[in-house]
Amino acid sequence: MNRMITSLFAIALCALMSWNLSNLERAPQPSCPLQSRAQQLLDHKLGTGVAWVSVHQTQSQGHRKLVRKRLGERAFVVSSQSKKESYKDKYQYETRSEKLSFPESQESLWQDHWVEKISVVVVTSKESPDLVPLLEVGLGLDRERGDQVMVTHRDFVVKN
């Protein structure tokens, strides 16, 4: 009898745990299409089979708040002053200065996961000086965040 109660309790506990685990919200994992996008850019620029690329993303999870200040599109005049200078009939000079103020707003954004940095390594058999800017712009890399691109030129033969 005790064994039967123990086994029913174990079955109920397992069912309850599996139900709880299935209902937990999982943090969304961002997809990484950067490697295929980088390879497409290189194939278009240099030709197919001339360059190989590896992309590594360092990601973090947790809770962080980003606060951005935004300026409005239209300013309004806070103060203005005018000044006129003249000397007989020889010259006349008029200046006007205005102090403008733009409306400000704050935007708060909460993130559960974010990209810390992206590293891109390229091995190619053709030298091309504009590969780094091409990849930075094409992949949306940001040097201030710590993103980096390294290009290595090697002569190699591709066997089909």
Image (cartoon, rainbow, N blue to C red):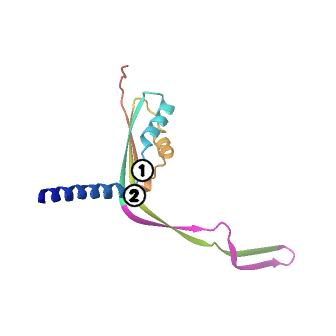
- Percent x, y for residue 150? 38, 42
Which residue occupies 41% across, 56% down? 114
Q: Which amino acid does label 1 sit on?
A: Pro
Quadrant in the picture for residue 71: bottom right
Q: Do the residues labelled 2 and 1 touch (CB within 8 Å)?
A: yes
At 44% from the left edge and 53% from the top edge, which residue is drawn?
Answer: 143
> How would you classify the magenta stretch by its main secondary structure?
strand
Task: Indicate yes or no whether the magenta region holds residue 20.
Answer: no
- Residue 159 position, x and y percent, is 36, 20
Residue bounds of the magenta highlight: 62-91
Which residue sits at x=78%, y=78%? 85
Q: Nearer the viewer, residue 35 or 149?
A: 35
Q: Is residue 43 left or right of residue 22?
A: right
Quadrant for the C terminus in the image: top left
Disc 1: which residue: 30
User: 83 or 7, which is in the foreground?
Assistant: 7
Residue 132: image x %, image y %?
A: 45, 42
Q: Name the residue under label 2.
A: 113
Type of amino acid under label 2:
His
Q: In the rendered picture of this protein, how many numbered marks are placed on residues? A: 2
Residue 96, horizontal then vertical, whole percent: 74, 75
> Which label sits on residue 106?
none
For mark 2, does the 10 Å Cα neighbourhood hold few (<14), some (14 to 19), or many (20 or more) residues?
A: some
- SS of the residue at dot 2? strand
